[in-house]
């Protein structure tokens, strides 16, 4: 019986070979599947985002440049004029002496001379000035400077040279020092004071001592009040004074929110007294404004005297200043603080 004869029975060997052939296909498929999974896993591993952060670039520390070398001292005394708001309120300015030498000096007398002032001014609060240090010495403002066309010359007059000079006695020597005035302290004072003197020949300007609150009741938070500017003529005929504007201060401002009052007060030398009411409110309600209120009751007036424009500062008297500050504090709710 041949192997191809269907009637021929299969021997065990034949059966085992057939089984082997039948099992070959699944084994190959499994191997192919494993290979595909391995490739996919590798691809997934390459595409998956890394969780480790890239190292940040290192920070490089720059070595600071050394400061420029200090210039050697000039071996001279230098001087300039300065004036703070407190100085102005106290009727003074200061001369600052820079001791640009290698040794301390002990001044025994300091005198300031200026052609715009009638007499020399003697400095006070004398004290030693160490080497390469500066000290300020107060000078009282005079009542009557030299008034005239050139009296209040602006900075840079006289060819740009300082107009004032300082004489300093110290340690057995006397030095003459030119005095710089970059802020035009003396020039501004002379112009303002000469205008004040000219205005005083036409009328006396002053603030009323009373600050009038609404209905004359105790001031409440948010209230306004009224300042009163008074002009009393002197009787000198032929002159006219106009107060165009009055500026506010760090504590007192126009009640309508403007930056200045415009009273339009007009008075002639031989006319009748005139009063101008200025509605007022507090400018600021922080304690800092009240602590630094040196100029709070010194108001700047823009005027015209016989048609000539000018500016002057009109300060309140002690009673009026106290009343104005008390009103502002009460209107801010700071009256009991």
Image (cartoon, helix red, strand yellow):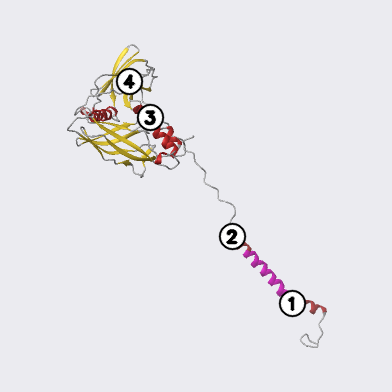
Q: Disc 4 or 2, which lies upstream in sequence?
A: 2
- Residue 241 magenta-drawn? no
Up the image or down, 303 lies above or below 92; here it is below
**Residue 252 position in % (x across, y down):** 37, 38
Q: Is residue 153 visible?
A: no
- Residue 304 on image: x %, y %: 23, 36
- State the residue in front, 122 or 99: 122
Question: What residue did someone put label 1 on?
Answer: 22
Q: Nearer the viewer, mark 3 or mark 1?
A: 3
Label placed on residue 319: 3
In 3D space, how far apart are the residues under numbered discs 3 and 1 (Cα atoms)? 123 Å
Q: Earlier in the sequence, mark 1 or mark 2?
A: 1
**From where the camera sits, is residue 215 visible?**
yes
| N-term-proximal mark, 3 vs 2 | 2
Q: Main secondary structure of the magenta part?
A: helix
Q: Of tags 3 and 2, which is closer to the observer?
A: 3
Residue corresponding to mark 2: 46
Label 3 vs label 4: CA separation?
44 Å
Judging by the rendered image, the residue that carries numbered circle 4 is: 77
Report whether 300 appears left or right of 32.
left
Q: Which residues are magenta?
A: 18-40
Name the image quarter holding residue 43.
Answer: bottom right
Question: Mark 3 and mark 2: span between their CA atoms?
Answer: 89 Å
The image quadrant that residue 129 belongs to is top left
Between circles 1 and 2, the one closer to the viewer is 2
Residue 30 image position (x, y, % from top left): 70, 70
Q: Give how far apart the Cα atoms at labels 4 and 2 are.
A: 79 Å
Q: Secondary structure at mark 1?
A: helix
In the figure, is residue 239 to the left or right of 336? left
Q: Secondary structure at mark 2?
A: helix
């Amino acid at each position: 019986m041949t192997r191809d004869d269907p009637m021929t029975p299969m021997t065990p060997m034949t059966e085992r070979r057939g089984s082997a052939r039948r099992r070959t296909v699944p084994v190959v498929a499994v191997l192919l599947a494993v290979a595909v999974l391995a490739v996919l896993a590798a691809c997934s591993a390459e595409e998956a985002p890394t969780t480790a952060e890239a190292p940040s670039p290192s920070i490089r520390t720059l070595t600071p440049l050394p400061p420029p070398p200090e210039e050697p001292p000039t071996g001279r005394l230098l001087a300039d004029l300065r004036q703070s708001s407190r100085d102005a309120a106290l009727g003074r300015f200061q001369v600052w002496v820079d001791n640009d030498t290698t040794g301390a000096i002990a001044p025994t007398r300091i005198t300031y001379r200026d052609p715009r002032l009638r007499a020399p001014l003697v400095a006070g609060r004398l004290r030693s000035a160490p080497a390469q240090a500066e000290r300020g010495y107060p000078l009282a403002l005079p009542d009557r400077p030299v008034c005239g066309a050139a009296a209040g010359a602006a900075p840079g007059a006289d060819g740009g040279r300082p107009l004032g000079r300082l004489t300093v006695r110290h340690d057995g020597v006397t030095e003459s020092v030119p005095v710089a005035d970059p802020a035009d302290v003396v020039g501004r004072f002379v112009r303002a004071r000469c205008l004040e003197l000219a205005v005083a020949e036409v009328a006396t300007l002053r603030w009323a001592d009373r600050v009038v609150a609404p209905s004359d009741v105790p001031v409440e938070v948010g209230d306004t009040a009224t300042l009163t500017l008074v002009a009393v003529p002197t009787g000198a005929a032929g002159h006219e004074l106009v107060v165009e504007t009055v500026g506010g201060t760090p504590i007192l401002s126009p009640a309508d929110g403007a930056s200045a009052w415009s009273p339009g007060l007009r008075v002639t030398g031989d006319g009748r007294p005139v009063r101008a009411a200025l509605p007022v409110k507090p400018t600021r309600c922080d304690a800092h404004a009240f602590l630094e209120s040196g100029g709070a009751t010194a108001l700047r007036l823009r005027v015209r005297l016989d048609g000539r424009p000018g500016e002057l500062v009109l300060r309140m008297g002690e009673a009026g200043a106290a009343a104005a500050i008390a009103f502002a504090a009460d209107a801010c709710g700071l009256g009991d603080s």
